[in-house]
Image (cartoon, rainbow, N blue to C red):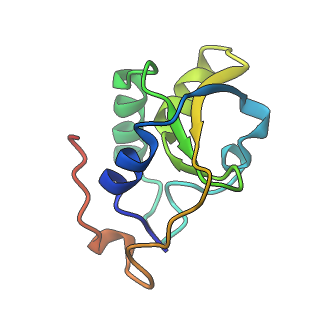
Amino acid sequence: MAWDMRKIAAAASHLDPDQVALTDIEELDENWWFAHGTPPTPRAIAGHMKRIRQVDRSHPIILDADGRLMDGMHRVVQALLAGDTMILAIRLPETPPPDYIGVNPDDLPYDVDA
């Protein structure tokens, strides 16, 4: 399952952010970026490292209604590396239905520069 992050960002735009403990973000201990067959090559890891360095943590991460991360893993990792214990987050009151079901992550229409 996957969501169109433009829709998720729009749904979150009117909600107030709050601080969330990094220890509450379960995805930090999951295979987040390489779970769907993409090998964790040095080049792939470097790509994520570059994005981690470049993110703007003034933008809150987005959690679904159950507290699962929907957007912002690079910001979460940047906070973790900085030694922070909290991060700014918006939690959606309801998790919207997925926009994509059964689609290979490589086939999703990502705009990585957004």
Question: Could you say which quadrant of the image residue 113 lies in?
Answer: top left
Residue at the bottom extreme?
Answer: 102
In the image, is 96 to the left or to the right of 99?
Answer: right
Q: Could you tell me which quadrant the C terminus lies in?
A: top left
| Residue 80 seen anywhere in this rendered image of the structure | no
In the image, is 113 to the left or to the right of 63?
Answer: left
Camera-nearest residue between 99 and 35? 99
Question: Could you say which quadrant of the image residue 54 lies in?
Answer: top left
Q: Position of residue 48 (x, y in %)?
A: 40, 39
- Number of disc labels: 0
Q: Is residue 22 above or below residue 9?
A: above
Q: Position of residue 74 (x, y in %)?
A: 47, 35
In the image, is 44 to the left or to the right of 86?
Answer: left
Q: Is residue 52 above or below residue 11?
A: above
Residue at the front extreme?
Answer: 14
Q: Position of residue 22 (x, y in %)?
A: 72, 31
Q: Position of residue 69 (x, y in %)?
A: 59, 49
Camera-nearest residue between 62 and 80? 62
Camera-nearest residue between 20 and 79? 20
Q: Residue at x 34, y 40 (%)?
A: 47
Q: Residue at x 46, y 72 (%)?
A: 98
In the image, is 72 to the left or to the right of 21?
Answer: left
Q: Residue at x 62, y 51 (%)?
A: 93
Question: Could you say which quadrant of the image residue 95 lies in?
Answer: bottom right
